[in-house]
Image: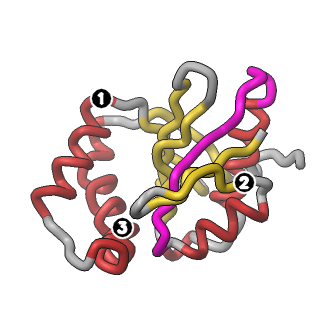
Amino acid sequence: MKATIPMTIRIRPVERADYDWLLDLHHTVYRELIISEFGYWDDDEELGLFLDSWETKKIDIILKQNKPVGMFIIEQQGDYLWLDELQIEPQYQNQGIGTAVILQLICRARKLGLPLRLRVLHANLGAFRLYQKLGFQKIRRAEHHHLMEVW
């Protein structure tokens, strides 16, 4: 499967000015999923998870017509690439943006001769189906997540 990111989509590194937008994106994308999966939402816990990513990980921002519409975090973890996060603003979902980014990451992993792995909450059925459509296979089921991989 080969695809390129649509011309109106660009990727850039995170900037300090993205902080408030990213925190809002995190809450918007995850609140209902977290409540569905875990039965509650804890503002302090979620802020801690967000801050851990903000302070320790390389975040890339997805732009459509120069407007931030999403983010992702990709890391090499030994013998695989790890898609740690992929978040798209709800109003930009189902437009092929996430698919295009994932396909680019699959291409990157293949060039490196590595699988691409990710985890998805059981409650996130839409994302699970998308990953399956893009060739990911479930390699393990954990208490709250599926671990998936594509070569």
Tag 1–tag 3 contact (CB < 8 Å): no
Mark 1 or 2, which is nearer the eye? 2
| Separation (CA) of disc 1 from disc 3 | 20 Å
On whether residue 112 falls in the magenta region, the answer is: yes
Stretch in magenta: 110-123
**Mark sitting earlier along the chain (3/2):** 3
Q: On the image, numbered disc 2 is attached to which residue?
A: 137
The answer to whether residue 117 is left or right of residue 87 is right
Establish if 8 lies above or below 84. below
Who's the residue at 10% across and 58% down the image?
44
Establish if 51 lies above or below 132. above
**Mark sitting earlier along the chain (1/2):** 1
Amino acid at the residue labelled 3: Tyr
| Separation (CA) of disc 3 from disc 2 | 23 Å
Establish if 85 lies above or below 107. below
Q: On the image, numbered disc 1 is attached to which residue?
A: 56
Establish if 148 lies above or below 29. above
Tag 3–tag 2 contact (CB < 8 Å): no
Looking at the rendered structure, the secondary structure element under dot 2 is strand
Residue 72 is situated, as x and y percent measured from the top left of the image, at 50, 45
Mark 3 or 2, which is nearer the eye? 2
Q: Which mark is residue 30?
A: 3
